[in-house]
Amino acid sequence: MSKQATPPSDGSIRNARELGIPKMLILGLQHMFAMFGATVLVPLITGMSVQVTLFGAGLGTLLFHVFGKFKVPAFLGSSFAFMAGILAVREAHVYAELTDLEKLQYAGGGIVIAGLLYLVLAMVIKVVGVKRVLRFIPPVVTGPIVILIGLILARHAVSQAETNWLLALLSLGIIIVASLWGKGMVRIVPILLGLFGAYIVAVGMHFFGVTNPDGSYIIDFSRIAAERVVGLPPFHFVRFDWTAIIIMLPIAIATIMEHIGDIAAISHTVGEDLVEDPGLHRTLIGDGISTMMSAGFGGPASTTYGENVGVLALTRVYDPRVVRLAAVYAVVLSFLPQFAAFVYTIPPAIVGGVSFILYGMISAVGMRTVVENKVDFSNARNLIIAAVILVCGLGFPNRFTVTIGGQDIIITALAMAAVAGLFLNAVLPGKDYEFGKNPDGDTAVNLKAGPQDKIAPETDEG
């Protein structure tokens, strides 16, 4: 049995029903708002449906709670890491003759297969233990890969922001102010405030006749009037192709590590060893199934949301029922086409301004992985692995084509980088990192090893 995490202060609430139904409903709404800004940003950037995205996030969260034995107070929203893959599929020349919908179908197929990787890893962890698995994906590999994902996305942020730099910088500024100087809930939802704070200014500019520098309207409200108030989300089924699969699989390596860290962070927040019970293998299965379900119906990949962990810490209400209420709210919103149409009126420049922070944060998380694990770059082995990963990801063309069996397959620079990093880590001698033997080096995923290769969340007592 692994060591239990230190219980939270006596002010925490494990059963929200004792607060009464009205307060429970409000707490669930707070969790919904916490995830909303980041979750809807993914379809705004990739061209996916806001309705389907909200449906996938809500239903995916509920499925995750089922596989987690209703014990993990986590919300699963849209994954930003997979946006790099979705945009790569949309820009791949092998799909150039297809419609935008068909491109998204192939991207969804790649995400579904990536979701299967979660299930495979969950079974392996269950059988052989987490220590033996994580030795093949140490921080010297995952850190640079995550850094690359953010850098690859950076150009998309700039291309959107330059449509109206005033609005882009305004949304960026609001997020910075809310994150650094905001109090309480303001600090929890900076993305939402950045989106809609700048949107209010954009509406005012629109009604005063101000246009974008290219002369286009800042906001187009015509789509709202054209939509019904209530209607089914525009679901579509996926298609499978080797190009999209190869693009998406390397991203799953990074997001799996993100999942492990998030579950441990939630464990530490609520004072329960959720890695042990319900078990890391069960939460990985829940995340994988959620991702496959969401992508299978036309939505993005899912991931556990740090914003909602922040709400847990803020309110100290740790009852998973409250998070499930937020999931129900998301499903309800997915059946309101006019609401989704309103979200689509957010100008691309505002989305670009928000993306400046979000894409940079992806790279920053990769750097944090390297720094907090004390990866020693005076060690030639580590330096070689990181150097090859970064040069492959930034030096090769964004994507190139190989022909196998008469079929053209796109290989992305990120895929090349991931394969190179995993290969070098496996074959080069002199590993200086092994999960569980140096607990101080496992902090990037906030985990420590316990007996029988089990893992327990890090506590203040160490």
Image (cartoon, rainbow, N blue to C red):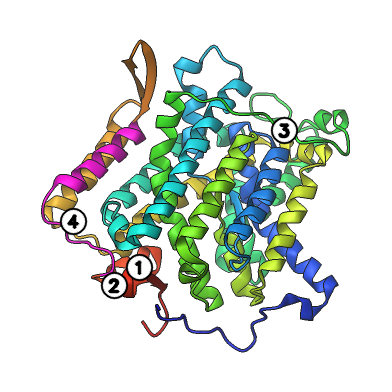
Taking the spot 29% from the left edge, 72% from the top edge, the residue there is: 439
Q: Which residue does the numbered mark 4 point to in the structure image?
A: 377
Q: Distance between the residues labelled 4 and 2?
A: 17 Å
Residue 182 at least partly seen: no
Residue contact between numbered discs 2 and 1, judged by CB atoms under 8 Å: yes
> The magenta stretch spans which residues?
413-436
Is residue 423 a member of the stretch shown in magenta?
yes
Which quadrant of the rendered structure holds the N terminus? bottom left
Element on which disc 1 rests:
helix
Taking the spot 55% from the left edge, 32% from the top edge, the residue there is: 108
Residue 220 horizontal/vertical position (percent): 77, 30
Element on which disc 4 rests:
loop
Q: Which residue does the numbered mark 2 point to in the structure image?
A: 440
Residue 56 horizontal/vertical position (percent): 66, 44
Which quadrant of the rendered structure holds the C terminus? bottom left
Q: What label does residue 218 carry, if any?
A: 3
Q: How far apart are marks 3 and 4 (CA)?
A: 48 Å
Residue contact between numbered discs 4 and 1, judged by CB atoms under 8 Å: no
Q: From the image, state whether disc 3 or disc 2 is nearer to you.
A: 2
Q: Distance between the residues labelled 2 and 1?
A: 6 Å
Q: Distance between the residues labelled 1 and 3?
A: 45 Å
Element on which disc 3 rests:
loop
Q: What residue type is labelled 2?
A: Asp
Q: Which amino acid does label 3 sit on?
A: Ile
Residue 211 horizontal/vertical position (percent): 72, 30
Marks 4 and 1, the one that precedes in the sequence: 4
Is residue 194 positioned above or below 243 on the image? below
Q: In this view, does 42 lie to the left or right of 321?
A: left
Taking the spot 11% from the left edge, 56% from the top edge, the residue there is: 430
Name the quadrant containing residue 369.
Answer: bottom left
Q: What label does residue 443 carry, if any?
A: 1
